[in-house]
Amino acid sequence: MLAPSGWNGVLGALDGTEHMLAGGDPMIAQYEFQTSETAAVPSQHAYLYFGVAALKRDEEGRAVVLRYWPTLCGPPRRDRPAAVTRHPWPGLSVKREGGCVARDVGTLRKAAERSRALETDIPTLRWLRDWRPGDQGEVDWLADQGIRTH
């Protein structure tokens, strides 16, 4: 990801998704999105959360290698690993329409810590450099790869 050098922690994508990174241990990445009218679940306003750990920092203390993992509501179900848990962790409540809600930020951070301990495939992101005028945007890069976004 290339971000402007004056980035304050919030990024907006062309699809309307908003990304925010909050400090702490672990850091929390929030993705807010609204599904379209033609989506499988139309007009759904939702949030996704990920725990984030800095694996390496530069000489100025900026994170240059990050590890992301999904923050779950509780232990995954064995019969349907992608489904919402049947046993939410303390402070989390499962919503009837899917997903869950955390009582407060501390509860969310604890869920991120517990989720990190689970056996999941965790991606690593590496900082390359600040965004510069003239850099290709994400949508243009995807189009060059033959990937349609809309």
Image (cartoon, grey):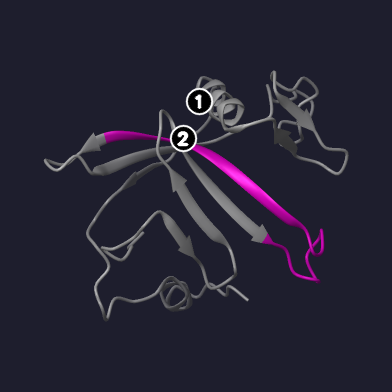
The image shows residue 60 at horizontal and vertical percentages of 14, 43
As for residue 74 lying within the magenta part, the answer is no
Residue bounds of the magenta highlight: 34-55
Rendered location of residue 120, percent (x, y)? 53, 29
Q: Amino acid at mark 2?
A: Ile
126 to the left or right of 40: left
Q: 10 Å neighbourhood of mark 2: few (<14), some, or many (≥20)?
A: few
Q: At 69% from the left edge and 20% from the top edge, which residue is drawn?
A: 89
Comparing marks 1 and 2, which lies closer to the viewer?
Answer: 1
Residue at the extreme bottom of the image, as rendered = 134
Q: Is residue 136 above or below residue 7?
A: below
Question: Relative to the observer, which residue lies in front, 75 or 94?
Answer: 94
Q: Tell me if 42 is positioned left or right of 137 in this view.
A: right
Question: Callout 1: helix, strand or loop?
Answer: helix
Name the secondary structure under disc 2: loop
The amino acid pointed to by label 1 is Arg
Query: Which of 141/32 is in front?
Result: 32
| Disc 1/disc 2 C-alpha distance (Å) | 9 Å
Residue underneath mark 2: 122
Q: Residue under circle 1? A: 116
Numbered badge on residue 108: none
Within 10 Å of the Cα at label 1, are there few (<14), some (14-19), or many (20+) other Cα atoms? many
Query: Can you say which quadrant of the picture contains the N terminus?
Result: bottom left
Q: Quadrant of the C terminus?
A: bottom right
Left or right for 144, reference 42: left
Q: Are marks 1 and 2 in contact (CB under 8 Å)?
A: yes
User: Between 67 and 103, which is closer to the camera in this rendering?
Assistant: 103
Which quadrant holds residue 140? bottom left
Mark earlier in primary sequence (1, 2):
1
